[in-house]
Each structure stands twice: as structure tokens, then as C-alpha cells.
Image (cartoon, rainbow, N blue to C red):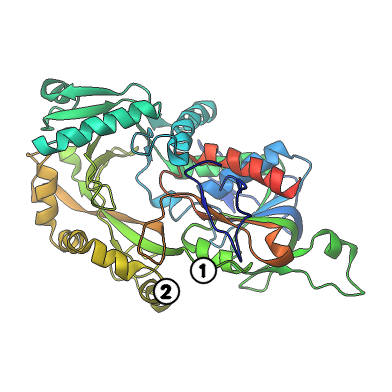
Amino acid sequence: MVPALRYLSGACGWPRGRFPGSFPGTCGPASGRPRLLCGGGRQASTSSFDVVIVGGGIVGLASARALVLKHPALSIGVVEKEKDLAIHQTGHNSGVIHSGIYYKPESLKAKLCVEGSSLIYEYCNLKGIPYKQCGKLIVAVEQEEIPRLQALYERGLQNGVKGLRLIQQKDIKKKEPYCRGLMAIDCPYTGIVDYRKIALSFAQDFQEAGGSILKDFEVKDIEMAKESPSASKDGMKYPIVVRSTKGKEIQCRYVVTCAGLYSDRISELSGCNPDPRIVPFRGDYLLLKPEKGYLVKGNIYPVPDARFPFLGIHFTPRMDGSIWLGPNAVLAFKREGYRPFDFSARDFMEVVINSGFIKLVFQNFSYGVNEMYKACFLSETVKDLQKFIPEITINDIVRGPAGVRAQALDRDGNLIDDFVFDGGVGDIGNRVLHVRNAPSPAATSSLAISRMIEDEVQQRFKL
């Protein structure tokens, strides 16, 4: 069993001792204007499939693509609750192609990230999707950070990250002339890309291979079809009914869910335990004004501190030429709450009452208060930025976009850092695979994740 894999057992989990598997419309050519298709070889009115994937983000689309390429004779559909694809976590992330340096050696996250980044570069080259391999510096600005930096370098070597080297002040200046630092890890294999373009390309591959995409289909129920003496032949062949909030129904043999911010709620539809809960954390970015873009060439990251749950503020160039600064990490009061005052009573009450969030707050009280303070007062964020680039002033930045991270949290307030998969109870549990947690860097790892999902679906469902 892979050590990094976490899965649930008991009422809604996989049998202990068995590796449970791999993982928690508009689409068109990446180089052209997206086009809306629902079909490939099947029509939009199709109401029955061999396999249905719930979720049109990058993990769901990569998995659908892998399944249809491996099993071209099967009818496979993707359902997405929005009117477009990949607009939430996939469309609101930093766009970094991560190298895999941060993760525990031999862990699933490390393996998938290193493999996944290589596959993403290959895929972009094959499809002509633009990217920049601009590299990253992880910079120690204080003497006390150097031992942690050296330990991180050793971890990266163990993970097989390409091209790593420790550099001193002189070489830091060669790569980032305006960056101050005592020592840094040079990660030349880190890059940037528009992950939504990749996701739409996955969708195009999927449809061209015969898959169907049904948008504006928000899943309300997943249940076994009710048998009766008058049950149709199709009803027996496709025993699962997937029903939308608008009353639409499709039938299928098997379901794979990749529901991101709603993965816990979707899992409960087949009888799974509600834990771990998804707690939404909003990450607000600042933008460096265009006239100051010369200050940053590649990614500049701090040395991570294991005492705190998130990475800290960093400098991220984007494919459009802009420079993002951030993000912070604050509780979002709505699962898709990209603005500070977005609020959902249901989402908020679930976090406060049913998750381990309050325990997380007490465990990281000073960190949380500091993040909230910096979110309100930009001058405090600028002080963090100036540790790396002293020339930046408050007049050089403006507030930018935000993303929401689907963070799985257990009842003890621990952030779930592994992949979590579930099935359910009864007959339906043998026909469903839930991806309950696909933590960052899921976008970088999406092609590697999809291979593991395809393998598990094949083994589990005997396709």
C-alpha cells in the first residue's frame, strides 16, 4: 500500500489492507476560441453511460480523458454544474507547474508531482499550449532559515526533482537582480502555464474520442434505480440514477466523482461519512503594477515553516505578463466565495459546527490573526514583500484576484494532506469511487493522477 494514501474504512470506506485506487459544455482547441460541444460520438440528449464522471475541473477532465482513451468502446460522460468548464479551482490557481520539492520523500504527493510536471510539459509541447519554464528561487533571507533551506534541498534530491542546486547571494542576484537573500534553492524546472487552457484541451481530447460533456448539471442525488416488474432493459443495464437539481436524470453503470469544493457533500449521497469536511480557504493576491514588472523575473518563494499550515507569500509571474503577489490564507465564508464579503449561511455553519475548524484556529491562532490583519492592511503585506525585494512600496501594488482552496479537515483540526477516496454503503458503494481530497499540487499532477484513477477504475469495476 502506498504510504501517503489515506482512505476511509468502515461504513463508507474501502476494505482495510487493500490499495483503494488512485484518487479524491465548453471546450475547444487550446489555441483557438473555445467551442461548446456535448457529444463527441454521442449526442447531448444521451441519458445513459457506462461511466459518469462528476466534476468538470482539471482532475475530472484528465480522468475522463484517460478513461475514454483506454476504453474507447465504453460510453463515458462528464457532468458539470456550471455552464462552463474548469472555472473554480482550476481557473483560480496560481498557474505554477510545481517541481515536487516540498513533499515528503516516498509520498504519493511527491511521486505524482514529479511525474505529473514532466507529463504536463510533454502535453503542452504536443498540443502547442504556451508555457514558460521560468524557474523558481526558494530564498532564505534570515540566517535561521538556512538549515531549513538545506533540509528542503535534500528532500528535493530524494524526490528526484531535476536540476536543483543551492546558490549564494552572488548567483541569486544573477537570476533575480532585485532579490535579496543569503542562500537559495534554484529550481529551474518550475514553470507557469494557464491550467484552464490545459483543462479545456483535455475536454477536447475527451470529446474527440467519443466522450460526452453535460454542463449546467448540478448533481442532487446518486442512487440505485428502483427495480420493478416493468423495469426496462436499459434500467437493468444502467442501475445507477444520477439526478440534477433541475430534475434531469441520467443512468449509468459506474460513477467517479471529482467534485473539488463539494467533494464531501457529493460523497454523502452514496452513504459516506461526512468526514473529512471541506473547509474553503480564500487566497487573496495582490498585483504588481505593470511598470514595476522588471523587479521580478521568475517565481520567488519563501522557505516554508513547518509550524504553520500554509506556504506564505510569494512572487508569481503569469502567462499574461502580470506578477501576482501572495496569496494569504483566510477562511472563505462561502465555498465559491472569491470576494471578502461573499457569504453562505449553510457553508459557514458547516465549517463552524461540523468541521474541526475551531480546533485548527486554536492550534494556529497567532498565524490566523496575522493573516487576517495583513488581508486588511496592505502595508503589513508590503513588509513581507520587502524582505525579498526591498524596492517594492505600497504604491507599487493593487488588489488582485482570489482563489478558494478546497482544504479537507478532520474533526481534530488537522489539515488532510493526502489523497482520500471513498465508495459508500450497500450496492451503490461497489459502483462509486469518490475523490474526496486531491490536494495541491493537483493541477500539476493531474495527468499522473488520472493514470492512477484509470487503473483503479479498471481494477475496481472490472471494465
Q: Is residue 371 above or below residue 157?
A: below
Residue 40, how many percent across, how many down? 70, 45
Q: Is residue 429 visible?
A: yes
Q: Residues within 10 Å of mark 2 (few under 14, many from 20)?
A: some
Which quadrant of the view contains residue 254? bottom right
Q: Give percent across and percent down for residue 113.
A: 44, 36
Looking at marks 1 and 2 on the same chain, the residue that comes earlier in the sequence is marked by 1
Q: Of residues 312 and 417, which is closer to you in this image? A: 417
**Front position in the image: 108 or 317:** 108
Q: Is residue 252 left or right of residue 4?
A: right
Q: Which residue is mark 2?
A: 354
Question: Which numbered dot is residue 121?
Answer: none
Residue displayed at 53% across by 58% down: 259
Q: Residue at x 54, y 60 (%)?
A: 83
Q: Amino acid at mark 2?
A: Asn
Tell me whether circle 1 and circle 2 mark residues in contact (CB < 8 Å). yes
Residue positioned 47% across, 34% down in the render: 111
Q: What quarter of the picture does the C terminus occupy?
A: top right
**Residue at the image position 37 percent from the left and 42 percent from the top:** 95
**Crowding near pointer 1: few (<14 within 10 Å), some, many (20+)?**
some
Question: In the orientation shown, which residue stands out farthest toward the front?
Answer: 17
Residue type of the residue flagged with mark 1:
Pro
Residue 260 pos. (x, y %): 49, 57
Q: What kind of element bears circle 1?
A: loop
User: Which residue is disc 1 drawn over?
Assistant: 274
Q: Nearer the viewer, residue 121 or 18?
A: 18
